[in-house]
């Protein structure tokens, strides 16, 4: 078990500085342009790939840190740069986590690199769970996976909604119902390899924030994938389904849930980066802006807001680091992953709103970026489990009861 320390080690400090420099020099200056264009920021992601910041090795190196802290530390800096571009860089990580969470080591080695490509040919991954009628209620997925034994192929049909990198990804990881009667326990994850017939992009969504990140529907129309694309393999799935059909005790998690649980501290770190960015702008502004003959920070009304923001940001970071450490060292005991995501995302919405207030009229314009940060912060209370769903997870963990 790795020691938990609030003192980052040399490796972690180095990664932090490296990502911060890229965020400051490359991401921040590009943020407004891509927010306005509402397009995937390919040139920025390519630059990130060139220095090794976008790529499966970066992900693996971060994951290899036994303290678990490298990941949230890197993500905080990326999203401090900009959340839309940050999401464009991190989006493939969700597909990678879906593969890592449910696949065999061989499947991981085959597919995760293909979610990223290389510096000269950048590729993306997409993790496709949500559907128009099933977001929080993941157990109600309608996308079906049917096995064609004669050909050893799986046939996928359905429509996925709000998918990050949906339709523009090289590798789509799709969660589908194999046995709908078993609800969430009858689901499995499949890799849809590049250029597979029948997979297409539906509508691309126009969004409130993180506009540089591509979000779209994914339509699966008789998509055939080889048997080897079932993550975890058929033998394991058959055994699991047989156990559930007999009403046996669950030994495994729903595939989508296993992925989302693991990524919650990372989503918290995204929200944290956005909040810190807005707080820093507000602090600098409050020291400079003069009203009634003195800097506005000399008024308790403004100084206390900033004191509150700083406290909330640090509290979120502590929850995130604890959750990240636990996820590598024994696992969550009391929904600590959900606590970190829930607190950090709500905190980020409040802190970015306060930043606008501190900047007054300037805050409401695009010039100072805090209005964009406020729009970007909001997604974190919605995706990868809404705040209400996080509270449900926490309530169930602390009570031991199936709170509805
Ligand atoms: C920008 C963006 C990117 C996304 N990326 C992806 C992606 O890459 N892959 C993917 O699979 N999905 C993705 N999503 C989907 C996202 O995870 C869902 O939108 C989210 O889980 C909420 O589901 P929903 O929209 O269906 O809301 P609903 O589930 O319909 O919820 C609506 C409201 O009801 C509340 N609610 C629902 N059930 C309960 C309950 N039992 N108790 C209390 N309150 C409840 C919710 O908290 C929410 O406030 C993305 C969404 C967005 C907006």
Image (cartoon, helix red, strand yellow):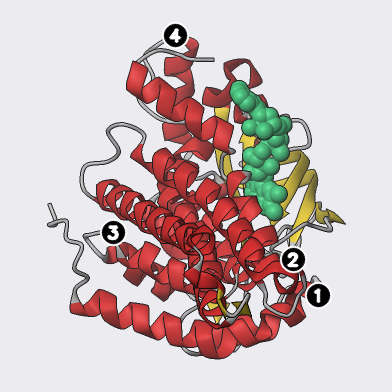
Coordinates of residue 215 in the picture (x, y in percent): 74, 58
In this view of the protein, which residue sits in the foreground, 192 or 140? 140
Asked if 225 appears above or below 38 in the picture, the reply is: above
Please tell me which of labels 3 and 4 falls first in the chain.
3
Look at mark 3 in the image and give the residue it sits on. Answer: 68
Which mark is drawn over residue 36? 1
Quick check: 354 above or below 261?
A: below
Judge depth for marks 4 and 1 and give the one in front. 1
Comes first in the chain, label 4 or label 1: 1
As rendered, which of 259 and 225 lies closer to the eye? 259
Callout 4 environment at 10 Å: few (<14), some (14 to 19), or many (20+)?
A: few
Farthest residue, direction top? 247
Which comes sooner in the sequence, label 1 or label 3?
1
Distance, label 3 to label 4, CA atoms, is 36 Å
Quarter of image, res 258: top left
Work out how far the residue at label 1 is from the one at label 2, CA to CA, in angstroms.
8 Å
Calculate the distance from the C-alpha at mark 4 to the C-alpha at mark 2: 45 Å
Of labels 1 and 2, earlier in sequence is: 1
Is residue 66 among what the camera can see? yes
The residue under label 2 is 211
């Amino acid at each position: 078990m790795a020691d938990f320390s609030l003192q980052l080690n040399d490796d972690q400090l180095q990664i932090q500085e490296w990502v911060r420099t890229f965020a400051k020099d490359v991401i921040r200056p590009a943020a407004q342009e891509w927010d306005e264009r509402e397009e995937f920021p390919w040139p920025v992601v390519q630059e990130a790939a060139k220095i090794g910041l976008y790529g499966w090795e970066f992900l693996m190196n971060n994951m290899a840190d036994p303290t678990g802290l490298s990941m949230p530390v890197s993500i905080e800096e990326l999203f401090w740069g900009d959340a839309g571009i940050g999401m464009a860089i991190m989006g493939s990580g969700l597909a990678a986590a879906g593969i890592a969470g449910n696949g065999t080591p061989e499947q991981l080695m085959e597919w995760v690199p293909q979610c990223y490509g290389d510096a000269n040919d950048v590729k993306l991954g997409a993790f496709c769970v949500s559907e128009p009628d099933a977001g929080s209620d993941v157990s109600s997925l309608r996308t079906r996976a049917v096995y064609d034994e004669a050909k050893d192929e799986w046939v996928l049909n359905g429509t996925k909604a709000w998918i990050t990198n949906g339709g523009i990804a090289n590798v789509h990881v799709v969660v589908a119902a194999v046995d709908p009667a078993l609800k969430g326990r009858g689901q499995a994850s499949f890799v849809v390899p590049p250029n597979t017939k029948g997979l297409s992009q539906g509508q691309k969504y126009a969004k409130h924030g993180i506009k540089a990140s591509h979000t779209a529907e994914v339509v699966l129309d008789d998509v055939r994938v080889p048997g080897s694309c079932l993550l975890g393999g058929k033998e394991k799935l058959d055994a699991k389904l047989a156990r559930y059909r007999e009403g046996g005790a669950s030994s495994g998690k729903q595939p989508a849930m296993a992925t989302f649980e693991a990524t919650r501290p990372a989503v918290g770190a995204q929200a944290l980066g956005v909040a810190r960015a807005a707080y820093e702008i507000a602090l600098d502004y409050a020291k400079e802006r003069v009203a009634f003959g003195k800097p506005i920070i000399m008024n308790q009304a403004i100084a206390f807001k900033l004191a509150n923001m700083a406290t909330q940001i640090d509290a979120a970071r502590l929850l995130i680091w604890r959750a990240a450490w636990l996820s590598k060292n024994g696992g969550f005991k009391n929904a600590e992953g959900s606590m970190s995501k829930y607190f950090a995302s709500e905190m980020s919405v409040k802190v970015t709103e306060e930043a606008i207030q501190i900047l007054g009229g300037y805050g409401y314009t695009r010039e100072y970026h805090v209005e964009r940060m406020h729009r970007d912060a909001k997604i974190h209370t919605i995706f990868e489990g809404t705040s209400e769903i996080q509270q449900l997870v926490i309530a169930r963990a602390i009570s031991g009861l199936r709170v509805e």
